[in-house]
Image (cartoon, rainbow, N blue to C red):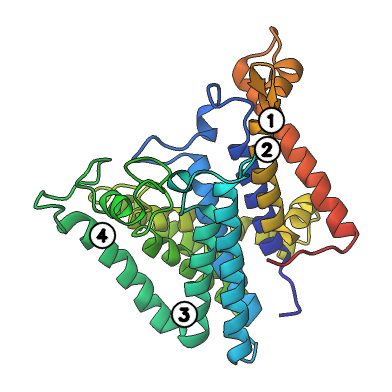
Amino acid sequence: MKDRILSVDIFRGATIILMVLVNTPGTWSNVYAPFLHAKWHGYTPTDLVFPFFLFIVGTSIVFSYKNKKIDGGVYKKITIRTLKLIGLGLFLGAFLISFPFIKDWADIRFPGVLQRIGVVFFFAAILFINCNWKTLIGITVAMLIGYWLLMTLVPVNGIESTLDRAPNNLANWLDVKVFGTHNYKADYDPEGLLSTIPSIASALLGIFTGLILTSKQEKKATLLMGIGGSLLIIGHLWDIIFPINKALWTSSFVLVTAGWANLVLALIYYLTDIKKLKFGSIFRYAGANAIVVYFLSSFIAKIMGQIKVGDTSLHGWLFQNIYVHDFISMEFSSLLYGLSVVAFYCFLAYFLYRKKIFIKV
């Protein structure tokens, strides 16, 4: 669609900037609690960031394909984009700065953030262009309830299932069986195989928001607020029997994060698209090259972590020599480092936007 909704661009950019911030502290040993993931059940503000991005992927699918003539070329482009995202993710997981520039095969992680974005985009886009909204609702409900039943009722090796981080957790067990040593951790992966199912539902919920934003519906902000509040309530009620958990991407987690996404997007929509207040331009710049900003931040951080400077890395040397001081806490020093990284990528995003350089993945 030619008509852009400013709030969507701002939301996407803010999400990608937050992803960079929470991924690049000065030191993981000293981070303020809100910038860390929950240890297992429950959620922190940081746990909202990735599902927010998948949510807005769904919303953006509506803008890209709602009025587009669907033919073989569209399916080809969707597939190519999916493969590019998966390929970039695998590259990030395998890259080494020293010869032979790639990890040992057994140490390469197969799942990952970009891989999940690619897979979620593929299925959400295919479902959107082939199903009406009523069918999509049915599919979303089926995914969330089906995942809940799988995780709580299916025994593992004859042992009753658990939602703890344990060998008889179905999602963790499946990741180890399928990926072996190619997981984030030896016993599970937060972007694992089975938990990808509900993550697709996160994007489908974003699609419903996109349909509302592109409709002739009046009081869209109010409607999104109502949907967001309802999802939050249902998600927290479901949490009682199916705990909110990002690592497992539980169904309650999907609803709660989509609830917050709708509330935040509704507020931005009200301020920018209705009240016409001008703010958040830097986020719009970042959103225009979101995947590029995320990939470069991850790639450069990995390089800086591998370059040795004395008995530490380039990353560690910069942090210790520029940001660590006796008169400020280590947590604040760590945050300042992350904010400096964010400032760099905001400037890069601004430069690319002004030069009209938009790198499509």
Q: Which residue type does callout 1 highlight?
A: Ile
Badge 1: how crowded within 10 Å, few (<14), some, or many (20+)?
Answer: some
Residue drawn at x 24%, y 46% is 163
* 263 up-or-down from 32: above or below: below
In the image as oriented, which residue stretches furthest toward the left? Answer: 158
- The label shown at residue 303 is 2
Depth check: 3 or 38 in front? 38
Q: Which residue type does callout 4 highlight?
A: Trp
Q: CA distance from mark 1 to mark 2?
A: 6 Å
Label pair 1/2, CB-CB below 8 angstroms: yes
Q: Nearer the viewer, mark 4 or mark 2?
A: 2
Residue drawn at x 73%, y 36% is 341
The residue pinned by badge 4 equals 148
Label pair 4/3, CB-CB below 8 angstroms: no
Depth check: 343 or 359 in front? 359
Q: Which residue type does callout 3 highlight?
A: Leu
